[in-house]
Image (cartoon, grey):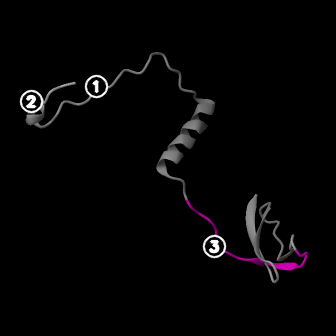
Amino acid sequence: MVTYQYRCARCGPFDLALPMGRARPEERCAKCDGDARRVYTAPSLTRPGASLTRALDAQEASRHEPQVVTAPRAERRPAPPSDPRHALLPRP
């Protein structure tokens, strides 16, 4: 479904969700039943963020190639400090 915008002379702008390619140049306003003309706007062509893209790709891949866990994940130890002065600090 695509959201199309229309403008009624009496009520103002409103949106209609219609199948792609089914929008007509004029529709009836739901509030006053008057004629509303279609407003042509720029398409919304935004891309999702990188984290959402990775999650969606992983979800798509899991349909055909599910990841099988054979062992628990090993705990990662923090990297040793690179500054030698940090070695003198007390440890928890």
Disc 3 secondary structure class: loop
Q: What residue does disc 1 label?
A: 77
Q: What residue does disc 3 label?
A: 42
- Calculate the distance from the C-alpha at mark 3 to the C-alpha at mark 2: 61 Å
Q: What residue does disc 2 label?
A: 88
x then y, percent, for residue 63: 63, 32
Helix, strand or loop: magenta stretch? loop
Q: Is residue 45 above or below residue 60?
A: below
Whether residue 43 sits left or right of residue 35 in the image: it is: left
- Calculate the distance from the C-alpha at mark 1 to the C-alpha at mark 3: 50 Å
Amino acid type, mark 2: Leu
Whether residue 41 sits left or right of residue 34 in the image: it is: left
Amino acid type, mark 3: Ala
- Marks 2,1: beta carbons within 8 A: no
* Residue mark closest to the camera, 3 vs 2: 2
Q: Residues within 10 Å of mark 1 (few under 14, many from 20)?
A: few
Disc 2 secondary structure class: helix
Q: Residue at x 80, y 62 (%)?
A: 18
Residue 39 in the magenta stretch? The answer is yes
Q: Quadrant of the N terminus?
A: bottom right
**What segment carries the magenta color?**
32-46
| Quadrant in which residue 45 is drawn | bottom right
- Marks 3,2: beta carbons within 8 A: no
Query: Quick one: label 2 or label 1, which is nearer the N terminus?
Result: 1
Q: Residues within 10 Å of mark 3 (few under 14, many from 20)?
A: few
Query: Quick one: label 3 or label 2, which is nearer the N terminus?
Result: 3
